Image (cartoon, helix red, strand yellow):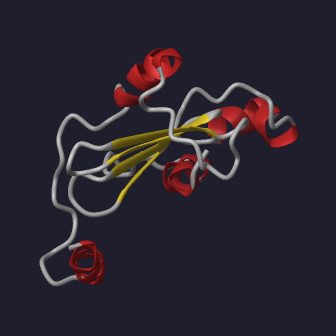
């Protein structure tokens, strides 16, 4: 679950039609079953996907965190075995299946979301300036 799941959940609770621009998944089907609210171990087949700046994407699944940067570099962490995410597993042979599964969650297309000069763009430009 992620905060984006609240956007499709609220209209669903109110009986309104979903807005196709809302990313995330309604939690209403789970409310009727109540497992996820009462049992954190209940099945939730979705991942949390976030991005910052063009081409930078993070995927958080139950056990792993995967990050792909605009330059093509990647990170993969086992959140259970390495909660501080200090050991990048991307080059480990036994992690290649997990890596492929997480790559499958990457967006097929990248679209600009913010207008030029927005706060997000200024933050991204500042981060890029510090990188050089």
Q: Position of residue 118 (x, y in %)?
A: 22, 82
**94 and 57: which is toward the camera:** 94
**In-image side of 121 versus 68 (left or right):** left
Give the image quarter of residue 128: bottom left
**76 and 12: which is toward the camera:** 76
Which quadrant of the figure contains the C terminus? bottom left
**In-image side of 16 versus 54 (left or right):** right
**96 and 57: which is toward the camera:** 96
Above or below, comparing residue 111 to residue 97 in the picture: below
Above or below, comparing residue 81 to residue 21 in the picture: above
Above or below, comparing residue 50 to residue 100 in the picture: below
Residue depicted at 27% across the width and 38% down the height: 107
Q: Position of residue 24 (x, y in %)?
A: 47, 45
Which quadrant of the figure contains the N terminus? top right
Q: Residue furthest left?
A: 116
Residue depicted at 26% across the width and 82% down the height: 126
Q: Exactly how many numbered labels are in the figure?
A: 0
Residue depicted at 21% across the width and 79% down the height: 129
Q: Position of residue 110 (x, y in %)?
A: 18, 47
**43 and 92: which is toward the camera:** 92
């Amino acid at each position: 679950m992620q905060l984006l799941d609240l956007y499709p959940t609220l209209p669903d609770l109110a009986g309104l039609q979903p807005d196709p621009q809302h990313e995330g998944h309604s939690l209403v089907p789970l409310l009727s079953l109540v497992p996820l609210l009462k049992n954190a171990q209940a099945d939730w087949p979705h991942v949390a996907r976030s991005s910052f700046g063009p081409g930078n994407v993070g995927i958080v699944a139950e056990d792993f965190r995967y990050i792909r940067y605009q330059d093509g570099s990647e990170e993969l962490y086992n959140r259970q075995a390495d909660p501080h995410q200090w050991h990048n597993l991307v080059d480990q042979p036994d992690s290649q299946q997990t890596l492929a599964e997480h790559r499958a969650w990457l967006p097929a297309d990248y679209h600009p979301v913010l207008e030029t000069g927005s706060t997000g763009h200024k933050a991204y430009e500042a981060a890029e300036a510090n990188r050089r």
